Image (spheres, helix red, strand yellow):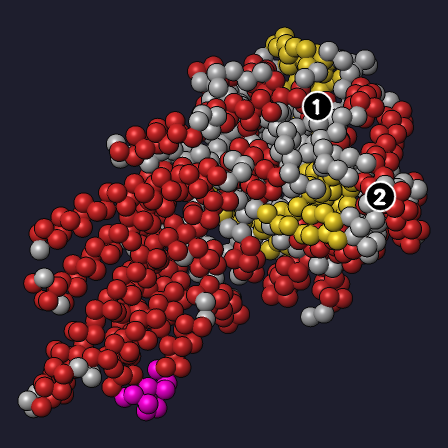
């Protein structure tokens, strides 16, 4: 087991290096740079020497391999570089937004798990009954409705019925839980619904599959209570693919709530991503891609560990 | 609510506004307003975006400023009075006494000199993007603590208006001496509000400066600029979470806001000092042929287009190279005689087809490069494509992200055929508005790539001409030449629409979204 963990950790480094190199080169392959957006985006008649000086200040006049070398050397020392737009450290730009994104991701995940596991199980156990039909409609609707659209509907309903809008600026949960939740519960709901629909569908199909397994039939033949068969044998085995889905969705939420964050004006990682790409802030985009890649790798790693805990066969291999 | 009712409501709101303005201002309150973008740094001299002006301007003063209700009249800001010598070569400013920076230090003429010296000739790594506007300044003298004398090398008709630029925040000479880059990361002005916080990506807070030199102002306790854009911004305005967004709304957003805010809304509208123009890539065939460029201009029904587009986009006014309605702009009667502005569009299109045939470009296929910003770029781009299709041309509409859009128009190696470009600045002054039309080796924003020394010469002549009548004559000649050559052709001028909560009082709309943003005399009726 320890060897397995070490192997996985060792593999993380070349993966991150590959991602870093790929993103760096792809961003540089695109025409134009941040100085255009900064000085010409509003039509300002800016002297060319100002733009030349700015490009030099940002190191954009240097060969690509020098730029990459400097950035990578910083990376090895734990320095993600400076945002080309704000001049602040990339780590700082990410850190001030990560708390919000993490909280929304956690709230949405919690909501999804609380909905998906019971509903998916019920849907499988009562296959083709009205209960199953209702749950299927609920989950398919969740898959069909984009989170941002649901978010817009939530906002419009709040506006129309209560002439109320969720707070526009973030307050920490520890500072004021009510202000915090009144801002974040809505995006968590919008995202969590779609998320729960994916997990519910997965839960239903895996439970149905597991219920056909020999060990379930054996347990039932031995006279084990049905509840025990479901809870101990079926549910635990059915959780493996569901855990994967939940884990990957969670990782996606860290940087992927691009439109939902715009709809609710959340100052999170997704919104920062859009702004960084729009402005051509390459250093910030690189930092953000590394963050998302790291999140996926860490979550995958955690899922693998969870697999091992849920399924002893993986540990024994 | 149908559009006629909405317009009536808008007109009523506009009509009601002056009456509201007569009420005695109340002190107190936190003004929340929306800003749809965020500034990259805090230095007035190095920025170009409204996203900078809206949160930062309340912290600073400028030497002069535009009088918003009477735009383009200029009034003093830090200058209590000023005189201009009869030859136009010397400007003497007398500063208000007792003006303090937010750190308690007093403002003197040395601060004004240090500020303008920094703009003219930035040192120590400081950036100045408006250096060219002050090229005609020979020296700045400070005969006493409250007097600054600016001497010019030659007369410049725009110079007084330049001193009212909202970008020329007056900085502390002492701080600039310590660090010329001090304003990039620090806010220290004399303005009505002191800096409290900039929460990156979220908001910006300022609070009343009790030592502000205008007694009794500002009225607000504080302001909070919230970075929010698009539909969420409109929602926040509808819910009263923000009182106003100062840049402008589309007609659709105005109508939606009027529908949801009902009697809590006030609407202000004005022609806007922003214009969409089409640049033709003169380095590419067949756009190097004046007949082709002129034919493409003649094919556009600007009058009909403006009437149709004003319902869906924030464009409305037909004009030449200067904003329609501006005192130095061409009259409608004269405009209609210029190529591309005739009301007889069929005759223009017949001429257009003839010119294309003569140039061998009857079946021209080309791409219109546009920005992927919906308002007003998309509707105007679609309109132009339709106009050119009506003379049998095949035009592809390509909408790009701002970075790629600007890259396609790079001066040295432009890849585009025709691009929907824009011209937008803080005032109507021709010295600023006509830069786009100068030869590309003189103008950083001419992406058409041509060199036309006649235009350069006319520009310089009008710039130095202090007699308004003579200046207008030169401007007309400049305009006629631009339109005859059609290197860059004006399409339709923008129309600024602001919807605000009625609790927000005494703010006046101007034709520029860069002006009247110090928030010194606005107040909240609550």
- Residue numbers of the magenta segment: A126-135
Q: Earlier in the sequence, mark 2 or mark 1?
A: 2
Which residue was labeled with disc 1? Answer: B442
Task: Say if A96 sits above or below A54 in the image.
Answer: below
* Horizontal arrangement in the rendering, residue B300 relative to residue A115 (left or right): right
Q: Nearer the viewer, residue B22 or A236?
A: A236
Q: Secondary structure at mark 2?
A: loop
Question: What is the x, y in percent for residue B428?
Answer: 75, 34
- Using a 10 Å C-alpha cutoff, classify the residue at mark 2 as few (fewer than 14 neighbours), some (14 to 19) or many (20 or more): few
Chain of the residue under the numbered disc 2 shown in the image: B
Question: What is the x, y in percent for residue A224?
Answer: 8, 87
Task: Say if A314 sits above or below A288 in the image.
Answer: below
Find residue B457 and report its image quarter: top right
Exactly how many numbered labels are in the figure?
A: 2
SS assignment for the magenta stretch, majority: helix
**Residue at left 52%, top 57%?**
B232
Tag nearer the camera, 2 or 1:
2
Q: Residue furthest top?
A: B143
Which residue was labeled with disc 2? Answer: B360
* Horizontal arrangement in the rendering, residue B3 relative to residue A70 (left or right): right
**Residue at left 9%, top 67%?**
A312
């Amino acid at each position: 087991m320890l060897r397995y963990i070490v192997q996985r950790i060792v593999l993380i480094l070349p993966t991150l290096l590959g991602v870093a190199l790929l993103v760096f080169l792809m961003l540089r392959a695109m025409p134009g740079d941040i100085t255009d957006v900064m000085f010409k985006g509003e039509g300002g008649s800016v002297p060319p020497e100002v733009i030349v000086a700015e490009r030099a200040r940002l190191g954009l006049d240097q060969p690509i391999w020098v730029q990459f070398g400097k950035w990578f050397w910083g990376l090895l020392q734990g320095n993600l570089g400076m945002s080309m737009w704000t001049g602040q450290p990339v780590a700082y730009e990410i850190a001030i937004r990560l708390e919000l994104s993490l909280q929304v991701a956690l709230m949405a995940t919690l909501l999804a798990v609380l909905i998906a596991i019971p509903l998916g199980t019920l849907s499988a156990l009562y296959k083709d009954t009205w209960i199953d039909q209702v749950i299927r409609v609920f989950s398919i609707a969740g898959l069909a409705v984009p989170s941002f659209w649901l978010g817009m509907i939530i906002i419009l309903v709040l506006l129309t019925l209560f002439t109320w809008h969720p707070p526009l600026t973030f307050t920490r949960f520890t500072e004021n839980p009510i202000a915090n939740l009144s801002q974040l519960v809505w995006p968590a709901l919008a995202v969590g619904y779609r998320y729960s629909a994916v997990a519910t569908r997965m839960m239903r199909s895996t439970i149905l599959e597991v219920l056909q397994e020999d060990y379930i039939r054996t347990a039932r033949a031995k006279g084990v209570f049905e509840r025990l068969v479901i809870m101990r044998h079926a549910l635990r085995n059915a959780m493996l693919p569901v855990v994967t889905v939940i884990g990957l969705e969670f990782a996606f939420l860290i940087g992927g709530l691009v439109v939902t964050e715009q709809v609710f004006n959340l100052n999170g990682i997704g919104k920062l991503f859009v702004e960084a790409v729009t402005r051509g802030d390459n250093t910030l985009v690189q930092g953000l891609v590394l963050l998302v890649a790291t999140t996926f790798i860490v979550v995958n790693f955690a899922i693998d560990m969870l697999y091992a805990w849920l399924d002893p066969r993986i540990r024994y291999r | 609510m149908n559009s006629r009712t909405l317009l009536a409501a808008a007109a009523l709101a506009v009509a009601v506004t002056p009456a509201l303005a007569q009420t005695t201002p109340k002190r107190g309150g936190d003004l929340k307003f929306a800003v749809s973008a965020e500034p990259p740094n805090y230095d007035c001299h190095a920025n170009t975006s409204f996203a900078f002006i809206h949160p930062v301007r309340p912290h600073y003063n400028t030497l002069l400023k535009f009088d918003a209700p009477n735009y383009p009249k200029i009034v003093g800001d830090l200058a209590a009075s000023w005189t201009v010598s009869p030859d136009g070569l010397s400007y003497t400013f007398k500063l208000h006494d007792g003006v303090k920076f937010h750190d308690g230090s007093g403002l003197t003429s040395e601060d004004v000199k240090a500020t303008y010296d920094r703009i003219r000739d930035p040192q120590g790594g400081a950036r100045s993007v408006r250096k060219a506007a002050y090229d005609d300044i020979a020296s700045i003298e400070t005969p006493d603590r409250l007097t600054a004398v600016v001497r010019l090398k030659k007369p410049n008709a725009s110079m007084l208006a330049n001193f009212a630029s909202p970008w020329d925040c007056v900085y502390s000479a002492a701080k600039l001496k310590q660090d010329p880059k001090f304003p990039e990361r620090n806010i220290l002005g004399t303005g009505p509000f002191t800096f409290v916080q900039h929460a990156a990506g979220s908001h910006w807070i300022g609070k009343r400066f009790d030592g502000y030199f205008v007694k009794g102002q500002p009225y607000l306790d504080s302001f909070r600029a919230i970075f929010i854009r698009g539909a969420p911004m409109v929602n926040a305005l509808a819910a009263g979470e923000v009182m106003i967004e100062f840049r402008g709304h589309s007609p659709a957003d105005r109508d939606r806001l009027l529908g949801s805010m009902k009697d809590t809304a006030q609407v202000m509208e004005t022609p806007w000092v922003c214009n969409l123009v089409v640049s033709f890539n003169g380095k590419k065939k067949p756009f190097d042929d004046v007949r082709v460029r002129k034919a493409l201009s003649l094919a556009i029904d600007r009058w009909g287009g403006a009437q149709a587009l004003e319902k869906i986009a924030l464009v409305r006014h037909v004009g030449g190279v200067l904003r329609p309605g501006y005192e130095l702009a061409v009259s409608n009667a004269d405009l209609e005689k210029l190529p591309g502005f005739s009301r007889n569009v069929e005759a223009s299109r017949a001429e257009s087809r003839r010119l294309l045939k003569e140039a061998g470009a009857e079946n021209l296929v080309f791409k219109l490069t546009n920005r992927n910003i919906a308002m007003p770029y998309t509707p105007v781009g679609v309109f132009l494509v339709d106009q050119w299709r009506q003379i049998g041309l095949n035009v592809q509409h390509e909408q790009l992200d701002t970075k790629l859009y600007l890259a396609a128009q790079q001066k040295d190696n432009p890849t585009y055929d025709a691009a929907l470009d824009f011209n937008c600045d803080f005032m109507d002054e021709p010295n600023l508005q006509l830069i786009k039309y100068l030869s590309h080796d003189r103008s950083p924003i001419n992406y058409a790539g041509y060199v036309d020394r006649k235009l350069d010469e006319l520009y310089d002549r009008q710039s130095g001409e202090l007699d308004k009548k003579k200046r207008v004559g030169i401007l007309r000649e400049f305009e006629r030449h631009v339109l005859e050559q059609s290197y860059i052709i004006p399409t339709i001028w923008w129309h600024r629409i602001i919807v605000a909560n009625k609790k927000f009082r005494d703010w006046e709309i101007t034709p520029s979204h860069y002006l009247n943003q110090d928030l010194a005399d606005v107040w909240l009726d609550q």
